[in-house]
Amino acid sequence: MRKLTFEEITSRRHSADQMHTVPRFPIYVILENIRSMYNVGAMFRTSDAACIQELILCGYTAQPPRKEIDKTALGATETVPWRYFRTGTEAAKYIKDKNVTLLALEHCDGSRNLLDMTCSFPVALVVGNEVEGVSDELISHCDLACEIPMYGMKQSLNAAVAYGIAVYQLIQKLNLSK
């Protein structure tokens, strides 16, 4: 075994121009009130890697261009389709008008274990603020809630890390349902 060179790795990937036309997974993501621009950038980068349909920023989530976002996004702000809404309710309405299921990544009284749950596609994963989580207002528009099982003392993960786990679990569920 040997480590691949940068050129070998990039030869297996789409170009930035191709990313505007490649088929995408039927997964939307709503980021509500994400306070860290580095988390926003990391979420853009994960969104590119996961080839999601669209990233929706709302509330006080920072929008590109920002050097703090670019530092962790590494160009993904140019390859991920995204839009901004002033409120979570506006973002939810946009998603509902597309007949997409809203799935909150949040501890709720009816939350399902992300690893075991089933859901229909297309789906919009809702990720909330690093401290407060998804707002009650946006939760009221969601169809389902899921949570990542926590086996230690902590009750949550970093928002960008949790998003990465959740979006790849959704891709796996989608691929298994085909």
Image (cartoon, helix red, strand yellow):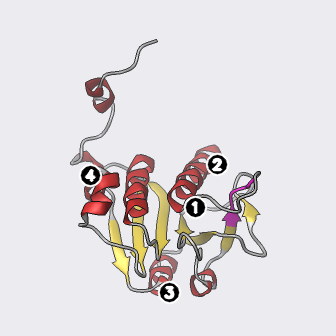
| Residue pictured at 68% horizontal, 72% vertical | 144
- CA gap, disc 4 and disc 3: 29 Å
- Residue 81 percent location from the top left of the image: 33, 62
Span highlighted in magenta in the image: 146-150
- Real-space Cα separation, disc 3 to disc 2, in angstroms: 30 Å
In the depicted structure, whether residue 10 falls above or below residue 137: above
| Tag nearer the camera, 3 or 1 | 3
Q: What residue is disc 4 on?
A: 75
Q: Which mark is residue 177?
A: 2
The earlier-in-sequence mark between 3 and 2 is 3
Residue indicated by mark 3:
89
Mark 3 or 2: in front is 3
Q: Nearer the viewer, mark 1 or mark 4?
A: 4
- In this rendering, the count of numbered labels is 4
x, y percentage for residue 60? 40, 80
Neighbours of disc 2 within 10 Å: few (<14), some (14-19), many (20+): few
Q: Sequence-wise, which precedes: disc 1 or disc 4?
A: 4
Element class at badge 1: loop
Q: Residues within 10 Å of mark 1 (few under 14, many from 20)?
A: some
CB under 8 Å between discs 3 and 2: no
Q: Nearer the N terminus, badge 1 or badge 2?
A: 1
Residue sitting at x 47%, y 70%: 31
Asked whether the beta carbons under mark 1 and mark 2 sit within 8 Å of each other, the answer is: yes
The amino acid beneath tag 4 is Gly
Give the alpha-carbon distance from disc 2 to disc 4, as whole Å: 32 Å
Q: Is residue 18 above or below residue 126?
A: above
The residue pinned by badge 1 equals 121
SS for callout 4: loop
